[in-house]
Image: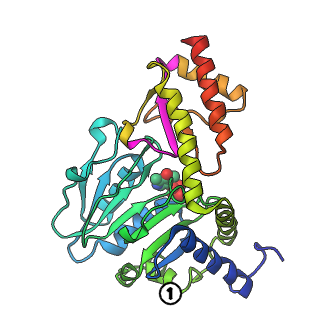
């Protein structure tokens, strides 16, 4: 039988799901007082579960709004209860993340929520805010497993699987024991974190094929030399494209401020929209696909997740130079 036929209650599948948890813990250096949960509904489901579980007892969900997914998370928080924007870079069209001294939390904060990598705008936190006793929660959907991080700074980390972890269909939630205990007990069973923690994410049938694929992906990451090696490769990849932008005499203009540049999503503009259209069409002809920027930023977005090899980035940088020569 294959993994899609096996019962999720079988010993074999238990080995898969607990194996995936153990491998993620090993690779990310997750301390013993955390669990790794596999939950359906993607990262967007976590926009709801986080406030439902923790905006209780007159507390307020605090949000740093640094992009489109961060805004969505805040809006869901505000539907559930009291939500507060602790900082926002919307005025700058999200060209950077927030500076620590811009963050103003409300009275009685339930948590501070950040988006570690802003997928659409191409910005990334380089150092995370210090929140003291206030639980720091991060949506790491688009940069989990791309570099080493200190998990102990966070009370809860979540990520949709489909960018760096495996196929779509699950969110991975890394949650500290005290946050499991604090799960809101007035919620329906499937919305409480402790349901997943107490049952090894097997209270009902989990997205078993996705979990299996995540485990294979984690084995691949380990085979690459773990997160130190992956991080080095990702830095090399991003530098190739950012250098092409910086050495273009202003022909290509990066959207993100340099200090916030993402290693996963490189966003930039050309001198005008017609050239951008042509760039995307010409690039597709030589096998460089998926470069159209999100409509909120326009221009070009090169998403260079773990699965993108260094050569792909080199090929794009060379194409950028050629395109500028022909159309500059
Ligand atoms: C892609 C993405 C999401 C949405 O993930 P789904 O799994 O589709 O719900 C949320 N946050 C960030 C930062 C993302 O990049």
Q: Which residues are magenta?
A: 260-274
Q: Is residue 117 shown in magenta?
A: no
Q: Is residue 308 left or right of residue 184?
A: right
* Position in image of residue 310 (x %, y %): 64, 42
On the image, which quarter does residue 221 sit in? bottom right
Q: Residue furthest right?
A: 1
- Quadrant for the C terminus in the image: top right
The secondary structure type at the circle numbered 1 is helix
Q: Nearer the viewer, residue 82 or 249?
A: 249
Residue at 47% from the left image edge and 65% from the top image edge: 158
Q: Nearer the viewer, residue 205 or 31?
A: 31
On the image, which quarter does residue 204 sit in? bottom right
Q: Nearer the viewer, residue 172 or 8?
A: 172
Q: Is residue 163 visible?
A: no
Judge whether 221 appears above or below 35 on screen.
above
Q: List the residue tagged with mark 1.
A: 198
Colouring style: rainbow
Q: Is mark 1 within 8 Å of ligand 1?
A: no
Judge whether 55 appears above or below 285 on screen.
below
- Quadrant for the N terminus in the image: bottom right
* Position in image of residue 122 (x %, y %): 45, 41
Rate crowding at label 1 as few (under 14), some (14 to 19) or many (20 or more) other CA atoms within 10 Å: few
* Position in image of residue 327 (x %, y %): 57, 12
Q: Is residue 273 shown in magenta?
A: yes
């Amino acid at each position: 039988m294959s993994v899609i036929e096996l019962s999720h209650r079988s010993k074999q599948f238990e080995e898969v799901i607990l194996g995936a948890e153990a491998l993620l813990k090993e690779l990310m250096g997750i301390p013993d007082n955390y669990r790794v949960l596999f939950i359906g509904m993607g990262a967007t489901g976590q926009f709801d579960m986080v406030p439902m579980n923790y905006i209780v007892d007159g507390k307020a969900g605090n949000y740093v709004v640094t992009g489109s997914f961060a805004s969505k998370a805040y809006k869901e928080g505000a539907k559930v209860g009291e939500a507060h924007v602790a900082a926002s870079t919307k005025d700058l069209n999200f060209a950077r993340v927030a500076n620590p001294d811009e963050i103003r939390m409300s009275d009685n904060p339930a948590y501070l929520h950040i988006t570690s990598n802003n997928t659409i705008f191409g910005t990334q936190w380089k150092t995370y805010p210090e929140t003291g006793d206030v639980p720091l929660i991060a949506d790491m959907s688009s940069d989990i497993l791309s570099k080493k991080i200190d998990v102990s700074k966070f009370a809860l980390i979540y990520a949709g699987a489909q960018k760096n972890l495996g196929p779509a269909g699950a969110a991975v939630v890394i949650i500290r024991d005290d946050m499991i205990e604090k799960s809101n007990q007035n919620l329906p069973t499937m919305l409480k974190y402790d349901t997943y923690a107490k049952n090894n994410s097997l209270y009902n049938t989990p997205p078993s094929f996705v979990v299996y694929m995540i485990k294979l992906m984690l084995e691949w990451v380990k085979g690459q030399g773990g997160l130190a090696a992956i991080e080095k490769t990702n830095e090399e990849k991003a530098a190739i494209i950012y250098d092409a932008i910086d050495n273009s005499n202003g022909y290509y203009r990066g959207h993100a401020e340099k200090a916030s540049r993402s290693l996963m999503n490189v966003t930039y503009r050309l001198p005008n929209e017609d050239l951008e259209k042509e760039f995307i069409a010409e690039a597709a002809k030589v096998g460089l696909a998926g470069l159209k920027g999100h409509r909120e930023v326009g221009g070009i977005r090169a998403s260079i997740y773990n699965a993108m090899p260094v050569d792909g980035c080199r090929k794009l940088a060379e194409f950028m130079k050629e395109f500028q020569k022909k159309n500059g």
